[in-house]
Image (cartoon, helix red, strand yellow):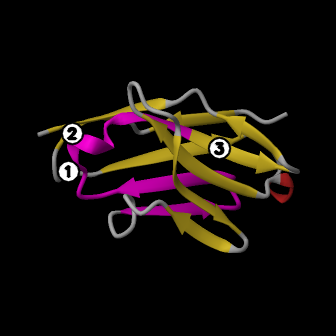
């Protein structure tokens, strides 16, 4: 079992920046990958970015604007979001992949106004 606690969401104007954080309460050696997903109203949850030993992966919508990073000592994953657009408005969920099982945080709201 793992608990994921997110923070850093909020409201910004278009062009602004936010940094999301997610702390995992589990030994880092057992987490295969961590990432961020988002779900806008009326839409399915979608990948934003993931990070693992193999590297990083970004959705096309995030490339060039968002940066995912991970602190293996504190077992925390971050998502730096720059150049935010109204279409980035969504609930952002932290994800941890552990031996094929997905674990999710409670979600943090990001709202971008035009």
Choose the circle earlier in sequence order: 2 or 3.
2
Residue corresponding to mark 2: 12
Question: Whole-Å distance between the Cαs marked 2 and 3?
Answer: 24 Å
Q: Where residue 63 appears, x then y in whole percent?
A: 39, 67
Q: Where residue 26 appears, x then y in whole percent?
A: 80, 44
Position of the N terminus, as image quadrant, is top right
Which residue appears at 59% of the width and 58% of the height? 50
Residue 57 occupies which quadrant of the picture?
bottom right
Choose the circle earlier in sequence order: 1 or 3.
1
Q: Secondary structure at mark 1?
A: loop
Q: Secondary structure at mark 3?
A: strand
- Front label number (1 vs 3): 3
Position of the C terminus, as image quadrant, is top left
Q: Which residues are magenta?
A: 66-93
Residue corresponding to mark 3: 95
Q: Where residue 111 appears, x then y in whole percent?
A: 28, 33
- Front label number (2 vs 3): 3
Going by the image, does 35 lie left or right of 20?
right
Cβ–Cβ under 8 Å for marks 1 and 2: yes
Q: Residues within 10 Å of mark 3 (few under 14, many from 20)?
A: many
| Observer-nearest of 96 and 44 | 44
């Amino acid at each position: 079992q793992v608990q994921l606690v997110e923070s850093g969401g909020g409201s910004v104007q278009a062009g602004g920046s936010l940094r999301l954080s997610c702390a995992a309460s589990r030994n880092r050696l057992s987490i295969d990958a961590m990432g961020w997903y988002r779900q806008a109203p009326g839409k399915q949850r979608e990948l934003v970015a993931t990070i693992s030993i193999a590297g990083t992966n970004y959705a096309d919508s995030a490339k060039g604007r968002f940066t995912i990073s991970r602190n293996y000592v504190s077992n925390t994953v971050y998502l730096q979001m720059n150049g935010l657009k109204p279409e980035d408005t969504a609930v952002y969920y932290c994800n941890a992949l552990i031996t094929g099982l997905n674990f999710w945080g409670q979600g943090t709201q990001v709202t971008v106004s035009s």
